[in-house]
Amino acid sequence: MLNVRDLGVAFGAVQPLSGVSFAVGKGETLGIVGESGSGKSLTAMSVMGLLPLSGGRITGGTVEFDGQDLTKLPERAYRKLRGGRIGLITQNPMTSLDPLQKIGPQVDDVAKLHLGLSDKAARDRTEEILGTLRIPEPALICERYPHQMSGGMKQRIVIAMALAADPDVLIADEPTTALDVTVQAQIIRLLDDLVKERDLALVLITHDMSVVAQTCDKVVVMYAGRAVEHGPVEAIFDRPRHPYTQALIACIPRGLDEATRLTGIEGTVPTVVNYPSGCPFHPRCPRAEAICTTARPDFSVEGDSAAACHFAEVADAQPA
Amino acid sequence: MKVSTMAIRSLDAFARMSIGRAFASGIGMVAGGFLILLVLVAIFAPWIAPFDYAAQNLMNANAPPGWPHLLGTDEFGRDVLSRVIFGARTSLSVSATAIAISMAAGMTLGAAAGYFGGFFERAVMTVVDLTWSFPDILIALIFVAIIGPGLTSTTFAIAIAYLAQFTRLTRAQIVRLKRETFIEATINLGAKPSHILLKHLMPNAIAPVIVVGMLAIGDGIVLEATLGFFGLGAQPPTPSWGAMMSSGTAQLFLSPWVIIFPGVAVAITVIAVNLFGDELIRALDIRDRLRGA
Amino acid sequence: MILRYTFQRLLMLIPVSFSISVVIFMIVYLLPGDPIDNLLRVGSSPEDRAELVAQYGLDRNLVVQYFVWIGNMFQGEFGQAIVLRRPVADLVAQNLPYSLTLGGLAFLFSSTVGMALGTISAIVRHPLLDRFMRGFILLGSTVPGFWLALLLILFFSVNLGWFPVSGAGGWKSLVLPVLTIGFGGVALVARVTRVALLDAQREDFVTLLHAKGLSSRTILFRHLMPHALLPVVTILALRIGWILGGAVTVEFVFGRPGLGSLLIRALGQRDYPVVQACLLMLALAVMLGTLIGDVAQASMDPRIREKKS
């Protein structure tokens, strides 16, 4: 459905994103995982064609959707895809809705715009979708304002907006980060169900490896604006070959009985102005050697997965 | 100990770095340089002015700009340039004095209201908000009408017109600071209110107030000119920019330069004050703190 | 909902108007000089004087005077102008329309032109336009109104002869006064509109609006403008007082009749009742302005509506 190849993004002279590739098909969930500042959200914005809003531009690669390259699509045609065939769910539901307008019209807009429905028909559809998202009393909710609702509720509204025109692809950018833990689980389950019921292609952007483990079929691990490892979820979790992926997996809390301490990754995420030379992870990597500081590692392919590490072949032999 | 050095350092930073930084930008340097020059001109007016500002020469009345009267003469044949130079004295000193009074009174009221809160705060703020919604020119006009025209009453009228502004701003700063941890800590440690207010709150609240005061000097100059224009400010023969324009209206068609040049002086001065104030705000990085009030 | 809010705001205005009326009453009482002196002919006896004082009610207790005064105000009975020897109500009725016309037009001019300029400068972000706007805003907020008025007269009336120098005859006499008052207003409104639009553009929800597939124009007019309007309405409402203040000087310079010139003349003549009536009308306008601003804001922003009711 969606096939991104070798995507690069620049803001003026800085290049915060380069060489990102992934593909998702119908009924499939792809996770893009990494710490904040790794370029996950930029990837989402590039696919949506919304980079110019923040002053960025695509410098290379292709974003192929349903056979056509979106990077060459004129704005007018792109608008039909946005909200129509590709839906976006943003990070912070608290600020994602226009506070001056009622919920109903904000959701209605999508169906009116993309499906050409009348006011009445669009509202019926809105209420129906809100219902399927397990929102009680949809008709009442439509007359409410965003500030009158909880974060979890608002995130459901945002999801409803993304679904209103029956899209093929859904891009969810950290959809649960701003929510309470219990609500997080509900939203993730909801998204998971939607993928199955509607045969959606879901791109789930998150920093949480446990979410990836629960819901995704495939995963791309990003670091400092690059993909460092990608492959099927089982393979990556069974045998993570990039030290960064290993570290991320090691960070997942494993429950009380194991009495493990919560761990983090040493060091800080590089910002776009000081991306390290060679392998970008080398300053924080436990097994970095001289070559890592100078040469950028190529992907070492193994089965369906690949890792960009000079020691990918032997990495799996090391304990994570 | 640590906390109070912090407070003092913020004052220090204001005095040294920020004014230097405001000068550092191109606009700041030009505007600041002009203001310094203007103050010097005002101070040394008797030595700089080519003519006696009060010397009349009816034979040479309403002379257009030229030689030897560079900016022409007024209806009594007095040299306009000399009057503009001496006018700078009046306008600057009246406005600066007025704003200093207004600032001192407003800071006291605002700090007390913000610190003590309760009924006192509500009473003060009701009155302040009341005058706040009235245009400054109306407040000043009424005040001058009560105590009569003249430079002294103009000074107090300006001071009263801007009192609300300083009171509101100071109160907003104090209320904001009171919520900050280091102040809460000092309060919990049992410091005396006067100590907290003077040693901790005021030094930290002062920077925005000073910047607004700086900007208000510009407003004060305009207000002084307006009152002068209504004939309520400086009385003849004392030259002030506003008074010059007032007597010039009658001759508007005959000798427009009598009106134009004092007005240009007001406009350039106020623009310089605003530009320099903007640079100060940027250098101190206090734009957000000014928004709330 | 909005009616209830309006009603609450109105209730809140009662103590405010009470304090304002007391202040106005007291201020006028403090004015120096005695208008009675102006009325007495040279050589009048103390009895004549006492009679006049009694006639105007100046011999009664201050509190009584206040309540008599405020009671009369409520009935539109503003008393008798001492110097002009005419009912104050007549004077106000005569002058008010001029001020309302001037103020209204100036208000309209500053809001429409200001918002248009602000919007354009927020959308077309061109460095040259930016610089022009900055300069314009700086000039508009610093140049003294009366001086601008004089310059306009000098240029348009004297040199070009397009508009009359003074007076209040026909639309032509309104152009320059409206421009004078509007200049500062346009600059202010343009600045607020611009900042508000740029702020609104940075809001998170705008990304999602684009993601819904809405066009930039729809987003601007249906979503960004309402947000930008909130601060603009606040400023405009506050500005009503300032427009009246501007009207005071501008009416004076252009020799137009109006509340402002009436007030200045009455202040000079120490004509208490006229000063009181003028101040009361101006205060009323200022309060109405803030009230309308508050209500307009509440009708646009559901969050405000709820917080205060």
Image (spheres, helix red, strand yellow):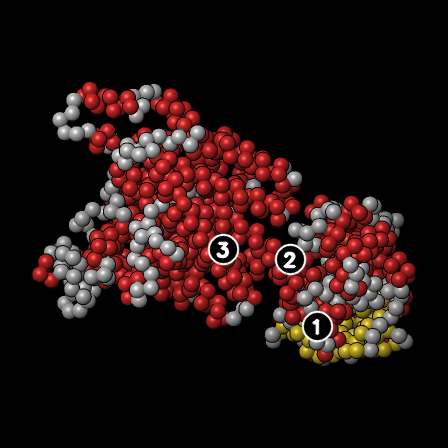
**Residue at image location 33% in from the left, 50% down from the top:** C256
**Residue at image location 68% in from the left, 58% down from the top:** C205
Marked residue chain, label 3: C
Q: Is residue C9 above or below residue B207?
A: above
B164 or B93: nearer the viewer? B164
B182 or C27: nearer the viewer? C27
- If you read the primary sequence from the N terminus, does the residue marked by circle 3 or circle 2 appear first? 3
User: Which numbered dot is residue C111?
Assistant: 3
Pointers 1 and 2 in contact (CB under 8 A)? Answer: no
- Closer to the observer: label 3 or label 2? 3
* Residue type (three-letter) at the residue carrying disc 1: Arg
User: Which numbered dot is residue C58?
Assistant: none
Element on which disc 1 rests? helix
Residue B68 falls in image quadrant = bottom left
Task: Give the image location of residue C186, x and y in percent.
Answer: 45, 58
Element on which disc 2 rests? helix
**Residue linked to disc 1:** A76
**Residue linked to disc 2:** C223
* Residue type (three-letter) at the residue carrying disc 2: His
Q: How crowded is mark 1: few (under 14 residues within 10 Å), some or many (20 or more)?
A: few
